[in-house]
Amino acid sequence: MSGSKPDILWSPHHVDRYVICDSELSLYRIESVGNSEAKAGALRLSEETTATLLAINSDTPYMKCVAWYPKHEPECLLAVGQANGRIVLTSLGQSHNSKCKDLMGKEFVPKHARQCNTLAWNPVDSNWLAAGLDKHRADFSVLIWDISSKFTPDASVTTDKIRLSAGDTDAGLVVTKPLYELGQNDACLSLCWLPRDQKLLLAGMHRNLAIFDLRNTSQKMFVNTKAIQGVTVDPHFHDRVASFFEGQVAIWDLRKFEKPVLTLTEQPKPLTKVAWCPTRTGLLATLTRDSNIIRLYDMQHTPTPIGDETEPTIIERNVQPCENHIASFAWHPSSQNRMVVVTPNRSMTDFTVFERISLAWSSTGSLMWACGRHLYECTEERNASSVEKDISTKMRQRAQSRYGHDTEQVWRNYLLAGGDDPQLKSLWYTLYFMKRYTEDLEQKPLVNKLPLVYSGIKNIVKSSSGTVESWCCWNGSDRQADVIRYHSDERCLALQLCGWIKRGPEIDVEPFLQSLEAEREWERAAAVALFNLDIRRSIQILNKGASAEKGDLNLNVVAMALSGYTDEKNSLWREMCSSLRLQLNNPHLCVMFAFLTSEPGSYDGVLYESSMAVRDRVAFACMFLSDSQLPRYIEKLASEMKEAGNLEGILLTGLTKDGVDLMESYVDRTGDVQTASFCMLKGSPGEVVKDSRVQCWIENYRNLLDAWRFWHKRAEFDIHRSKLDPSSKPLAQVFVSCNFCGKSISYSCSAMPHQGRGFSQYGVSGSPTKSKVTSCPGCRKPLPRCALCLMNMGTPVSSCPGAGKSDEKVDLSKDKKLAQLNNWFTWCHNCRHGGHTGHMLSWFRDHTECPVSACTCKCMQLDTTGNLVPLDTV
Amino acid sequence: MDLHILDHRLRVTSICKDGLVNFTHSLIKLMFLRNRTRCKFFSLTETPDNYTVVLDEEGFKELPSSEHLQVEGATWLPLNVVSNGNASSSSQAVGVTKIAKSVIAPLAEQHVSVFMLSTYQTDFILVREKDLPVVIHTLEEEFKIYREEEGEPIPVHSKDMQNGFHKNGKEAVKLTVHPVLSPQNQFCVMSLDPDTLPAIATTLIDVLFYSNSSVKDEAPPTQGLDCIKFFSFSLIDGYISIVMDTETQRRFPTNLLFTSSSGELWRMVRIGGQPLGFDECGIVAQISQPLAEADISAYYISTFSFDHALVPEEDIGSVIAMLQQQRLEVVS
């Protein structure tokens, strides 16, 4: 000020008024553009707002600081602190109403003249005006004036050698006796009243911050610091204060006043103003000299009270309200995040700090974000199918339908997954066939082949030996076909894994064909029949398909074409079939003709028909490719599958490291950690499960279940997992030990079942069959009592729904269980009270405090997850 | 009570009356161009004998070396007593009087030479840097002592300063009681908003640098004179303090200079018949102790040659009488 830099003050009560003060005081009214479009002399502040100059007051020279009267009436009363320490009350644009008139022009004069640095009205007792002055060797630097007091030249004052000229004292306009004098022989640079009590005043003195308590002025609390300028209380958190020194802001907690709770990063230029946002908690705006940037510190996430050890996180942001350097700024008192900035040449800008957006994405895919005081929820406008199609939705549905948990009829998991994904179908059938084969082996003594079946066809055919070649005949005719078929144990095993043949030594595809017919896969059945050199069966199947309900009549046409088969090399049939087959839409029909028209030993038309199922192609290859061709083909196909992350390839790779590679690219492609986890758990518990990738999928899947609050599902998964991979079984995590002897209660029970006889002595009911551990099995001292039913722990819970008949039913399957969870011990880690889990749960459904009388512990609220309920059912 | 050792390293210099022209440039820079110099502590006192300039090392670099410049060899550190507000002494008196018993007398007993500089805002007690261990050791019972470094007060204790601690010579120095004289002119102690310093710059320059010419016309000042030429200007940590007589004050615009609302005026007691030098101890003590006993406020400004105390004009009679009495007691 004093002619140099303008400052800006918002009216505390009229949200559309503010004052700019430099060498004079100018009152402005801010309006939205719509209201004042045509008004002359309106200054544009932003796209929406303009300001109109209402009044100018240039009565008070040498202004150093200005403070606006905090009460509603009188409306525009300002206190001006001058360079010589005098404080003058003045007003702007007021019709001189009576109350205001008394105060207008009133002066408050310190004993020794020096600069007035700061002014602060008491927000409660608004007659009190605190002034901070520069240092004088014999005088006080903090003076609190009562603006309603009159100058009374009483005896005590005259002895103080007051030599005011007579003119000054007329009309009682000059006051020389302050209400309070504080801070002798010190300088005061900034002041603010503390909202905690109307008689507490915080002052930035020379080299220290002091809290003066007007109830006892001889005492003060102070802390030595450099950061003594611009003290200001957080309007939302009355113990938090900001002050600054040069480029550094210090944040203080008045309850822990010894040192700043934090200091903000130092800025290269000295600060000129620091202000808390009145409309939003924890937002501090700072301005440095010669800068066009206002730096904001967002202490939104600072835990309050501010912790001792943890460094609170603060988000720093810069905003640039205008191009020019900013002289000062002022937050709007009520409009959110809004401020007006003023430049040294008095141009003004109305500016709203855009609120940071915080975004939350739930585990179920709904998206919300918050901006300022608004909360937005994202809803998809398009059809919901894209959400349905999303893997997370699918996994969630599959988890609910217990996908992966059918360990007997493994293939059924494909149905649990929804039954519409051919890759999953292939995968689960593969796993099913593998399991079935393993079971067969278990019945036989041939155990040494156990790992082989899980290592996939790729490894099976590698180990192939003793292959028998045979020229085959068309089924039902003596005509020698022009093909060589290969046989070996391994190929036979591979065919089993492909599902073409049942277990057993004889190669019979008939059951497979019948199952395909039952599933109305006519073309595929026809193709499989043909590959088994049974044209007649193939034609029969096609006929059946054509005549079936909603059957495709074209199948008859294909059957006709098929029946014309000739092995003559240059026949018209061959020529037409090999070219026209490509126009057939169905891949199975297509490959049938490819097979019939191909040269012996080269079946690329069949083998590389990518739209045919991998298992069919592999089965075909196992029948018709030589020992040299087969591994090459399988190898090539497997690496293709691996590349594409196609689960059908698991048939080839098995649950080996190759399989994990394949699964990795599948997970990369789909994100389906659920299938990956379940599938890999089926693998041999040695290497595959230990693979870090597999562990990662499993952990992620568990986390996913937890995030969905599918805690029962997760527990179920853990049980499932520990069955297949015993190394993952967690160690016991909870032990209950006796208060008296310190021995574990549960341990003694399970280790010494014969002591069950002993329990009944102490048991409440006389039934010896239900063991009730109401006393420590070690020392026989009674266990603590439940805070609610007052029975010793170990007694069954009466209200437990599991008790009674149903209890007995489950007893058989869960015979290892000592008691239902409802009977189990529960206690609060904070207050140490507790009781039966069932009782506690029902208590805290309606209460927040501990059930023990006179204990005010809010046990359940201490548990952050205590009030969450699982979203799944057992 | 706290005692702050301020973060300034000061030199005490004297410019003889004739040599002032050589220093005009640097003095004007130090006084008026605050932003052009890093000097934070500057005091210029004109007496009939010379100009005493006390400034920190940054300021000292600005002074050209010249035969007209006399420099006291030591580095001096300013001490400042901070009352912290909760020491509610019944005494109304301020300035040197307040610290006479707690600081001045103990230091005199320990034979520490002090150089006093009172301003409108506060009183600085300058001690030699080499005496600091003694000072801390002597005063730490009475005061919490802080050393200001980079603006942060850091507590100090004598055990931190043990190395280099040696008691000053204990040999009984015969206490000289110096003659005092009291000129007739009335003085006022004033301050000024540094922003308005340019407004009085020409007057100040006139008073400081051209005062001799006007004096020449009048009768040359004699020892035991009625009026004394005394003017002091200091600019310390941004605060301005000016001491001048009422004659000089009339030359300044009335509304710019700050003083107390009671408009109090002061009379001077000059101590010493011969230049006092810097090694003698107890000079301030012998003035301030009687003042403290009588509870009379005082300013005290040491210069290169003599010491000057300012006391309220209504008390000058009793002060002179008291000091004369003291002198008689010692002599007898």
Image (cartoon, rainbow, N blue to C red):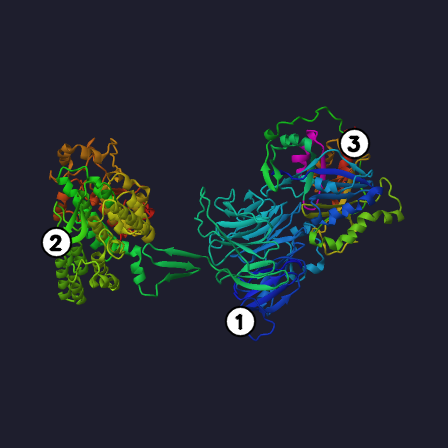
Q: Quadrant of the N terminus of chain A?
A: bottom right
- Distance of mark 2 from mark 3, alpha carbons? 143 Å
Q: Position of residue B249 (x, y in %)?
A: 78, 51
Does residue B148 belong to the magenta stretch?
no
Viewer-nearest residue: A488 or A179: A488
**Image: B281 above or below A791:** above
Q: Position of residue A598 (x, y in %)?
A: 23, 56
Total marks shown come to: 3
Q: Which mark is residue A33?
A: 1
Element type where label 3 sits in the image: helix
Neighbours of disc 1 within 10 Å: few (<14), some (14-19), many (20+): some
Q: Which residue is mark 3?
A: B328
Viewer-nearest residue: A141 or A491: A491
Residue type highlighted by circle 3 = Leu
**Image: B123 above or below A335:** above
Residue type highlighted by circle 2 = Glu
Which residues are drawn in magenta?
A: B99-121
Q: Nearer the viewer, mark 2 or mark 3?
A: 2
On screen, residue A341 versus residue A825, left or right, reads right
Q: Nearer the viewer, mark 1 or mark 2?
A: 2
